[in-house]
Amino acid sequence: SVFDLFFQVDSTLARLQSGLGIGLTMVKRLVEMHEGRISVSSGGVGTGSEFRIDLPTVAAQNELHPAEASVPGRTLSILLIDDNLDSCELVALSFENDGHRVTTSNDGQEGLDVALANKFDVAIIDIGLPTLDGYEIARRIRAAREKDAPILIALTGYGRQEDRQRALDAGYDAHLVKPMDVTSIHRLVEKLMNE
């Protein structure tokens, strides 16, 4: 069950180690995206765990092609605001490898300041952020930028219809549920840019 979404050994509200229960699900999906396998073994509670990741080998590419961006013929300016440093870096690298320019921020207020001081084609914003949540960021960008606002994509751990509607009401163009599938983000950006 450790790879199941939102699974936690300690499900009490007073648990010392809080989290969403998405970390190992994300790891498993990333490994599988690279055609690998992940397994875990443990002797029981208090004995630790051993995780094993097997990945296939691939031939090195002789040449990178940054011009082959996911939006053909166009280099996008993308803003990522996410307080999860690892996932933010992963998404940023994937867009940079496609030839796009990426700016990142891990704080709500700082991210808003960057969004208002610069012009971006796309802003991918986590909803649960320190100092300022993603809903407020979207509202303020829309109010300040009006028709000049970037395409806004909300990122959240919640995927109910009311969560999606709340994101749209705040000014987002689209709503994605974590854990992030990098390929899905690329497809969504391409679709929104071509509308």
Image (spheres, helix red, strand yellow):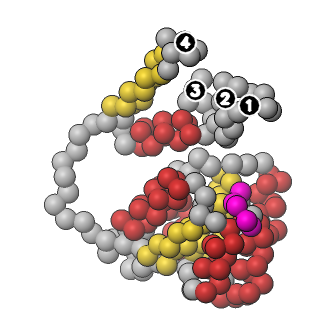
Q: Quadrant of the C terminus?
A: bottom right
Q: Position of residue 193 (x, y in %)?
A: 55, 75
Q: Which tag is nearer the camera, tag 2 or tag 4?
A: 4
Identify the mark at residue 44; answer none if there is no mark: 4
Do residues under tags 2 and 1 come within 8 Å of each other at their CB atoms? yes
Q: Position of residue 105 (x, y in %)?
A: 57, 68
Looking at numbered disc 3 in the image, what kind of residue is underneath it?
Val
Front in this rendered view, residue 190 or 127: 127
Distance Cα–Cα, label 1 vs label 3: 17 Å
Structural crowding at the residue carrying mark 1, measured as other residues with C-alpha within 10 Å and reported as few (<14), some (14–19) or many (≥20): few
Q: Earlier in the sequence, mark 2 or mark 4?
A: 2
Identify the secondary structure beneath mark 4: loop
Q: Earlier in the sequence, mark 2 or mark 1?
A: 2
Residue found at x 74% / y 31% = 15
Distance Cα–Cα, label 2 vs label 4: 15 Å
Q: Earlier in the sequence, mark 1 or mark 3?
A: 3
Q: Is residue 129 magenta?
A: yes
In the picture of the structure, the residue carrying the numbered disc 3 is 2
In the picture of the structure, the residue carrying the numbered disc 1 is 15
Q: Quadrant of the N terminus?
A: top right
Identify the secondary structure beneath mark 1: loop
